[in-house]
Amino acid sequence: MYMVVAYSMILRLINDEYVYHVMLIYITVDLSLEEPEEFVRRLRALATEEKENGIIVQVVDADSIAGRDHLLEVLAQSLEAERRSCMLAKRVEVDMILRLACTRQISDAIERVGLKKESGKALLVAVVREEDAYDSRSMKEDDVGGEDDGRRKGEEWKEEKNDDSSSYYYNLLISFKDRLKAVDGVKRVYDDEVEVGLRGEGEEKEKEEKEEKKSTVYEHLASIHGISEQELTSCISSNKLVSILAERANLLHR
């Protein structure tokens, strides 16, 4: 079993004239009695019940993803590709899983990062776009981060708050999250940061185990995505896996 650090949270992405509300959820699942494709289909059907035009939903195996930053980097690419009409697929959720897996083949993407019958941990991404165009000139100065985080101008992730300007979308996603708990196959829906992994027997050696788990996860993810030791060594980013995977995803459409 590998350690996974996941975040259940709601974010808002401002990208020029568009505003997207995004929910990341960590869930544990039991798919031993049904096909993963049917499970994901039911989750998307539930999202459609919440909103007439539906909420974009993608679900992936948590052990195949390099954390929250990996998901957000790829999601931003998919939404930007939709805006520019240059997606790798007809739907955002399909474009996203292709980019997460760094492949153009959907079968390869599902094999690499998709849910499988033996999957026990999943990361769910739910996205809804505000229906009214967003005027970037109306942004207040404190709505834009002061430091350059490497994203394009006009694009900013902010954690969502249930204020008057966003309560409809916030509540829409919260309602969807609450209904997930009753879906067959969902064992638990987490509400905050989660760390999952093996613990030692008897007295816990937390510090040593944490370092060992990180090393194991790193090797596991590098193996899944075919990242060589040379690539990792040559990458100067502080988060090498995310940087390499995000760059690979960005180059898929070229």
Image (cartoon, rainbow, N blue to C red):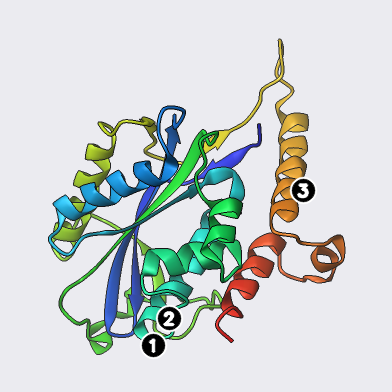
Q: Label 3 vs label 2: CA separation?
A: 30 Å
Badge number at residue 160: none
- The residue shown at (61%, 67%) is 102
- Under tag 1, what secondary structure? loop
- How crowded pointer 3 is (Cα within 10 Å; few <14, some 14-19, many 20+) is rated as some
Residue tagged 2:
81
In the depicted view, which residue is nearer to us: 158 or 249? Answer: 249
- Under tag 2, what secondary structure? helix
Residue tagged 1:
84
- The residue shown at (61%, 53%) is 112
Q: Quadrant of residue 233?
A: bottom right
Q: Earlier in the sequence, mark 3 or mark 2?
A: 2
- The residue shown at (59%, 41%) is 4
In the depicted view, which residue is nearer to us: 150 or 249? Answer: 249
The amino acid type, in three-letter code, at marker 1 is Arg
- How crowded pointer 1 is (Cα within 10 Å; few <14, some 14-19, many 20+) is rated as few
The amino acid type, in three-letter code, at marker 3 is Glu
49 relative position to 97: left or right: left
Residue tagged 3:
219
- Under tag 3, what secondary structure? helix
Percent x, y of residue 106: 52, 63
The amino acid type, in three-letter code, at marker 2 is Ala
Q: Label 2 vs label 1: CA separation?
A: 5 Å
In the depicted view, which residue is nearer to us: 251 or 165? Answer: 251
Percent x, y of residue 181: 28, 33
Q: Label 1 vs label 3: CA separation?
A: 35 Å
Cβ atoms at labels 2 and 1 below 8 Å apart: yes
